[in-house]
Every structure is written in C-alpha cells, then in structure tokens.
Amino acid sequence: MSEAPSLHSRRTLTLKFDLPISKTREFWDFLREGKFVTTKCKKCGLVSFPPQSDCPKCMCGEFEWIDLGKEATLLTSTYVSVMPPSFTGTDPYIIAIGEFSAGVRVLAWLEGVQREEAKPGMKLRVEARLSKEGNPFYVFVRA
Ligand SMILES: [Zn+2]
C-alpha cells in the first residue's frame, strides 16, 4: 500500500480556543472558591470526572454536584522533560493521576515534588490556582 501524496509544512501554529462550559460552569465557580467538586448522575449514581452534564452510562441529563474533598492517592505519574510546544517556557514537570475516595481519577500537574519522590500510594492534596489569564485550574501537591 502506498502512502497518499501530501504536502508537509513545519510552520508553528498558535492555537486559540474557547471551551464550552455552560453546563458545567459551576465546577469552575466552585474551584475559584477552593472547592473540588464533580457531577453525580441523579438516575444511576455514576460519579464522573471531569464533570459530565449528561451521564456517559445512562445518558440522563440530571445530575447533582458532590464535593470530592481535597485528598487523593497517587496512582501513577510521569516526568515530562520534553515539553509540547505550548509548554516550552516551563521547567520540566510531573503529570499525575490521583484517585479520590469517591473512586474518580483525576489527571493534574504535581507540584513541589521531585520526580524520584513521586511514588504510587503517596498522599496528595488538590489545590486551586489561577492562570495568568485569570482562569482557575487545579494541581496536586504533597498532602
Ligand atoms: Zn447515569
């Protein structure tokens, strides 16, 4: 099978985007207040993360907000030393997956920890931050 002919370009593109958050906007409002919440389906009880306005299991559109608390347990992590172009201005960083007692798993940067210290089972705490554009986001730190 031969490869389709194509033109290659090595230009750097600037990516600007708006994420629609109308149905789950409250997540970001709670985060600004320092609360870490997610959605729970009112019909089948599925707890989802990221927040889902429509249940991925039963498609029900009714949900309630539940507080996940701040504590999580590190499941796995990876040290990123070769950054994607949009992060080339940052130092190497650690991406972690933390599991909350509600069973949801959350992917976030792990701050203030050396890569050799990041071990499965480590206790984490989620913290809210504000980007320089003023958008809230969350990171893990050592509990
Ligand atoms: Zn459901």
Image: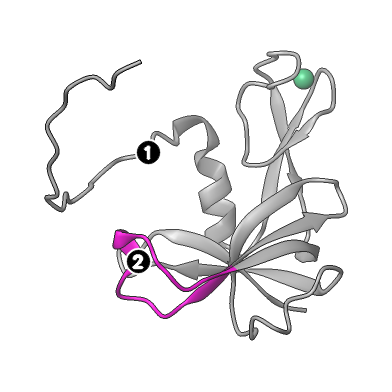
Identify the element where label 1 is drawn. Answer: loop
Which of labels 1 and 2 is toward the front?
Answer: 2
Q: Which residues are magenta?
A: 79-94
**Which kind of residue does numbered mark 2 sit on?**
Phe
Q: Residue at x 81, y 55 (%)?
A: 100
Q: Which mark is residue 19?
A: 1
Question: Within the image, what quadrant is residue 7 found in?
Answer: top left
In the rendered view, would you say 68 is above or below 74? Answer: above
Q: Residue furthest front?
A: 1
The image's mark for residue 40 is none
> Quarter-wise, where is residue 3 in the image?
top left
Relative to 31, say whether 24 is above or below: above
Labelled disc at residue 87: 2
Q: Is residue 109 magenta?
A: no
Answer with left or right where residue 21 lies relative to residue 11: right
Q: CA distance from mark 1 to mark 2?
A: 19 Å
Percent of width and height locating residue 18: 30, 40
Q: Earlier in the sequence, mark 1 or mark 2?
A: 1
Q: 10 Å neighbourhood of mark 2: few (<14), some, or many (≥20)?
A: few
Q: Is residue 90 magenta?
A: yes
Callout 2: SS: helix
Give ligand 1's quarter of the image.
Answer: top right
121 displayed left or right of 48 = right
| 70 or 104: nearer the viewer | 104
Horizontal side of residue 16 vs 92, given as left or right = left
The amino acid on which the numbered mark 1 sits, given as a three-letter code, is Leu
Residue 52 location (% of width, % of height): 62, 31
Residue at 78 percent across and 79 percent down: it is 143
